[in-house]
Image (tube, rainbow, N blue to C red):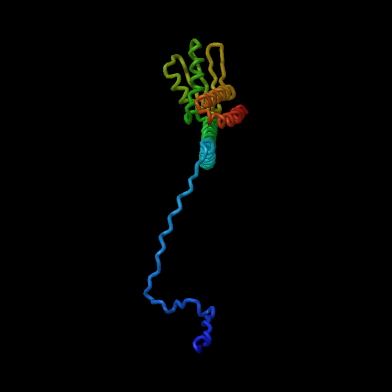
Amino acid sequence: MSNITQQVAPPKRWSFSESLEDFSRHEHDVVGEVLDDEEEEPEPSITLHPDELERLKAEAYQQGYRQGEGDAVQSLSDEMANSIAQVLAFMEEEETHRNAKMMRLAEQFVEGVCRVVEQLFAGDLSQTGLRHQLAEDAALLVAQCEGTITLDCAKADEPALRTALAGAKDVAITAEAERKAGSVAISAAQARITLDESQWAEAVRHRVAEAVEALIRLAPVSEQEAVQDVEPHIVQKEGE
């Protein structure tokens, strides 16, 4: 009966912390499970409508075309500006050269004409290509006269007259000391003709004017303007 009456001992109770597993007791060489590599996600499939694709292509083409056109225009503008600058510089240089050339031509022309006119009016017929003008005029008059002919001239004109009348017959040339150069008196029978300085100067003036006009016609177009500016003053000076 004693066994029956013996009380049953109550069961042992565990706290919550004691019920948890102590992982520190596990062996360190335990290899954990290796997780499988994650499968690569497939690339998203992008599908464009044909019309949308054509629109994008057209936009890209237009953008590239505009960019290329802008670059080409800028390049051409730079090249054109450079070319224009070079042309203007060349034209300015040529204009300077042309003006200098015309000025030299005008100076040489004026100098030459003035020198010839000065020699003509100085009375020395031997210093110019026109020195035989008076003698030639006298020879023409002598050829039209008949009989014995007498020429009275200045000593300065005598050599040219004798040269011009070398083949003429019945012609007597008398050099007068008091007669000024450029004056010749021709006597034949009852006629007497005088070639004076003014008549000869007028003939010379016309010949110089004709020479100037011939020079203008033969000169290049670019140089005619300079010659035309000089010619009226020369002719006016000669006629004074």
Would residue 219 be found to the left or right of residue 239 on screen?
Answer: left
Q: Quadrant of residue 224?
A: top right
Residue 28 seen in this snapshot: yes
Instruction: Pick out the residue farthest to the front.
Output: 1
> Percent position (x, y) of residue 197?
57, 25
> Percent position (x, y) of residue 9?
52, 85
Of the pair 81 and 224, the residue shown nearer to us: 81
Query: Which residue is located at x 43 percent, y 55 percent?
Result: 39
Of the pair 29 and 144, the residue shown nearer to us: 29
Numbered marks: total: 0
Of the pair 183 and 94, the residue shown nearer to us: 94
Instruction: Pick out the residue farthest to the left.
Output: 29
Q: Quadrant of the C terminus?
A: top right
> Percent position (x, y) of residue 83?
51, 40
Q: Is residue 73 above or below residue 161?
A: below
Query: Which residue is located at x 53 percent, y 17 percent?
Result: 186
Q: Is residue 54 above or below residue 43?
A: above
Q: Is residue 27 above or below residue 215?
A: below
Residue 88 seen in this snapshot: no
Instruction: Pick out the residue farthest to the top.
Output: 146
Query: Which residue is located at x 42 percent, y 79 percent?
Result: 25
> Percent position (x, y) of residue 58?
53, 37
Q: Is residue 200 above or below residue 42?
A: above
Query: Which residue is located at x 54 percent, y 23 percent?
Result: 210
Of the pair 101 and 55, the residue shown nearer to us: 55
